[in-house]
Image: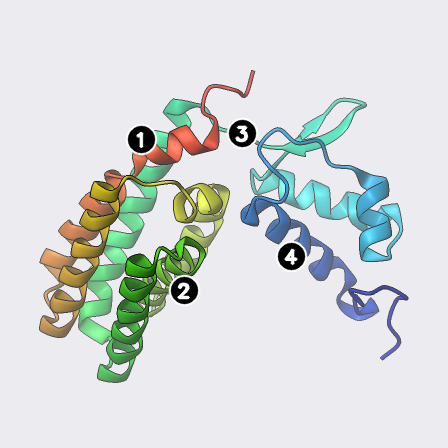
Amino acid sequence: MEKLESTIGINRRYLHDEVVDRMRDLIQSGELEPRARVNESELTERFGISRTPLREAIKILATEGLLELLPNRGARVASLSQAEIEEMIEVIAGLEATAADLACRTISDEEIAVIERDHHSMVKAWKDGEEATYFRLNRAIHEAIMAASRNSVLGAIYASLSGRIQRSRYAVHQTAEQWSRAVSEHERMIELLHARDGEALAALIRAHIRSKTPVIAENFGAGLNT
């Protein structure tokens, strides 16, 4: 299959989906920060594409709430108010709690083993002060529990919402006390997965996510979306 001349090499057949995915990654990774303007010239050169597929991708990401369209001024990365962040985290907490309950009915021993292995690696990263590795594994654990729910509708809604605050949720500065508490809660999650105690795991995860609201709001720059 012929490819565009680009170091990234977006395949022509999947050009539309690839541009959307790669722009979404730039936003969720934090490379494009909240309220940052989308530089179309820079991105078309970076991806080796014309403005047409880029603008189509911008429209799609705007419907997802990741970008804001500015009349006659292009687009910028969306930001959230304090109230919006609190509402979003409450919904995400509910989705993950539901997924935890469902997962305890369907999760396999092998899946738990993978989650437990990631947990041990996450704890090591915490002790070594390797924040990037810690947050990557933290995210993998939460997403593995969601996947173990075997509910594609739940997973799709979760992916759409959590993507908007993904960087702030998994790459925020935490105090030593907050970090220690998070690790302890993850250890308890492993215990409850082994016990297949869906009710207790759902309650724990809901509280675990709700407790992150202040630090996520602070990191996201709440109140700047005027």
Identify the secondary structure beneath mark 4.
helix
Q: Residue furthest top?
A: 226
What residue is at 40 percent from the left and 53 percent from the top?
131
Residue depicted at x 25% and y 39%: 210
Q: Earlier in the sequence, mark 2 or mark 3?
A: 3
Residue 169: numbered disc: none
**109 with respect to 173 (left or right):** left
- Mark closest to the chain's N terminus, 2 or 4: 4
Question: For mark 2, what is the residue?
Answer: 152
User: At label 1, which amino acid type do we have?
Assistant: Pro
Q: Amino acid at mark 3?
A: Ser
Residue 138 x %, y %: 35, 59
The picture places residue 123, in percent across and down from the top left corner, at: 27, 63
The kind of residue on which mark 4 rests is: Asp
Marks 1 and 4, how far apart at CA: 29 Å
The answer to whether residue 1 is above or below residue 223 is below
User: Label 3 neighbourhood size at 10 Å, few (<14), some (14-19), many (20+)?
Assistant: many
Residue 64 coordinates in the image, percent (x, y): 57, 43
- Element at badge 2? helix
> What label does residue 79 carry, if any?
3
The label nearer to you, 2 versus 3, is: 3
The residue at the far bottom in this view is: 110
Left or right of residue 113: residue 184: left
Query: Is 41 on the left or on the right of 78, as rendered?
Result: right
Per the model, the C-alpha gap separating discs 1 and 2 is 30 Å
Image quadrant occupied by the C terminus: top right
- Residue linked to disc 1: 214
Q: Which one is earlier in the sequence, the residue at label 1 or at label 2?
A: 2
> Label 4 belongs to which residue?
21
Q: Quadrant of residue 37?
A: top right
